Structures are given as C-alpha cells and as structure tokens.
Amino acid sequence: MTQPFATPFSGEELMDAGTFSELHSRLAERAERRPAESQPPAARRAPPKAQRIVDLAELGARVVSVPAPTRNAVRPAPVRAPAGPAAAAALEAEIDRASSQEAVARLAVTLARGYASATALLLVHRSIIQGLCADGLEGRADAILFPDGAGSVFGEVAATGRAFRGAPRAGGLDARILRALGRERVREIAVLPVSLGGRIVNLLYADNGPEPLGDAPAAALTAVCTRVAAAYERLIRERKRSAGA
C-alpha cells in the first residue's frame, strides 16, 4: 500500500442530509436492480428456490430472498487480486480519481481482495445496513438488508465505529448473514468501519476462508477503509464545487 493515506475528514461539514441521501440511495438502488437486470428473461420467469435471510416480524426489516445455492455450484477459485504491490498501487490510484461512489465501492472490494479471500462493502444509512458489492463471495452481498440495531457484529461496528476481528458468532443474525454471503465456514472475519464526517457510511467485510486473516492484511484492510473515506470526501467536495459554479 502506498503511504500516507489522506485523512477521511478535514473538519468541514460535508455530510449534509441531501447530499448523503442522494449519493447513497442511488448506489443502493443500482445494487438492488443489478441481479434481476443481468438475468435472461427465462431465468426471471422461473426463479430458483429461495431462502429467507431477514425476517420481517423479528427484525423490523423487509424480507429479502436470494437463490439457494445448488448442490453442484462451482465455487470461485481462491485467487486473490490484486497480484502484487504494483497492482495494488494501480487500484489505489484508480480509487483516488474515481468519478462516482459506485466506482469507488467496486474498486475498494477488489483492492481489499488482495488481503483476504472474500470481501464485501455494505452501506449504512438511516439505521439500515445493506450489501452493495463484493469480490470472492459464493453468495450475494445485495441480498443483505437489516436494521443496524437488530443485534449483530455489523450493527455494533456501525453503532460504535470500532472494528471487529475475530471468530464469527455461531448463531443469530450474524450466522444468517454469513450464510447468505456463502461464508458460513470461515475461521475469522473482519468488519471495519468507513467513517465520513463523524458518521459510519460503509462497512468493509473480509475473511480468509479457513485461515486467519493475519495482522498485516488486517492493517491493510483498515488502510483501504481510510482511502475509501478520502475518495468519498473528494467526490462530495467536487459535487459542491460543481453546484456552486
């Protein structure tokens, strides 16, 4: 990773409600639409058997369904990206000049995949946590939607801003989230906050499958979060300058 990283917040108020809502809502809507739009018409007419991930009555969120994994599904190859410091530096540069929040998010999970077997970026907005994009998952990040107060490691990180790294919880909502992501048999997970203007706007999820993450990769993932926050700040500043021109 190239150093130093820009600080995610310089003291100026950037997160006015209108800007925050517009930027994040558009990205969340794109993530929700993409799986359906990418399927051929026949697949949409005859969806596979689905499993319920979030219970409406229990958690106060809408029900989200994802296709149940097939018994013979092909698992993604355990290949990490980027391959080497030069590729990581190139991805960092792309994040630094990305022209949209969606581009930042997708580049971020690719960069983070260089330090873990699977990564995902989740949106934290208006007390809801929603999956946006991922790399290396066997499940679907966009199937995740639940209240931040529903009782989970993800909600705790969103509420406190303190990163979590350790063994995943055996039951409850955390187990259901990992099952939806296709990561229920991992040894260790990390859930890291992306903070902007004193608010947690994203969570970066990462795991290394049956192996521990390790201290150096965990530190690199934290640096990815810092870079993402800096990129968001830049985009908001540019948007404000354009609006004032």
Image (tube, rainbow, N blue to C red):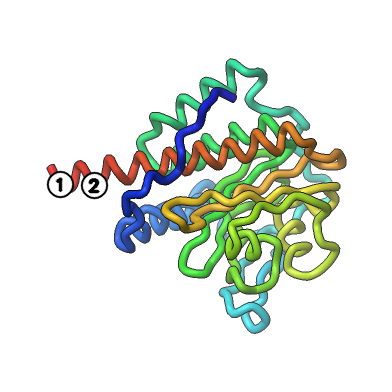
Relative to 233, does residue 169 appear above or below in the rendering? below
- For disc 2, the marked residue is 240
- Label 1 crowd bin: few (<14), some (14–19), many (20+), radius 10 Å: few
The residue at the far left in this view is 245
Q: Residue at x 76, y 32 (%)?
A: 77
Query: Which mark is on residue 244?
Result: 1
Q: Is residue 121 left or right of residue 69?
A: left
Q: Residue at x 45, y 51 (%)?
A: 196
The residue at the far bottom in this view is 57
Q: Residue at x 58, y 65 (%)?
A: 159
* Residue 202 on image: x %, y %: 53, 52
* Residue 149 on image: x %, y %: 61, 73
Q: Secondary structure at mark 2?
A: helix
* Residue 35 on image: x %, y %: 55, 51
Q: Quadrant of the C terminus?
A: top left
> At label 1, which amino acid type do we have?
Gly
Relative to 176, does residue 63 appear above or below in the rendering? below
Which is nearer the eye, 243 or 184?
243
In the figure, residue 61 lies in which quadrant?
A: bottom right
Query: Which mark is on residue 65?
Result: none
Relative to 108, does residue 129 appear above or below in the rendering? below
**Residue 46 appears in the picture as rendered:** no
Q: Is residue 244 left or right of residue 171?
A: left
Q: CA distance from mark 2 to mark 1?
A: 6 Å
- Label 2 crowd bin: few (<14), some (14–19), many (20+), radius 10 Å: few
Mark 2–mark 1 CB contact (< 8 Å): yes
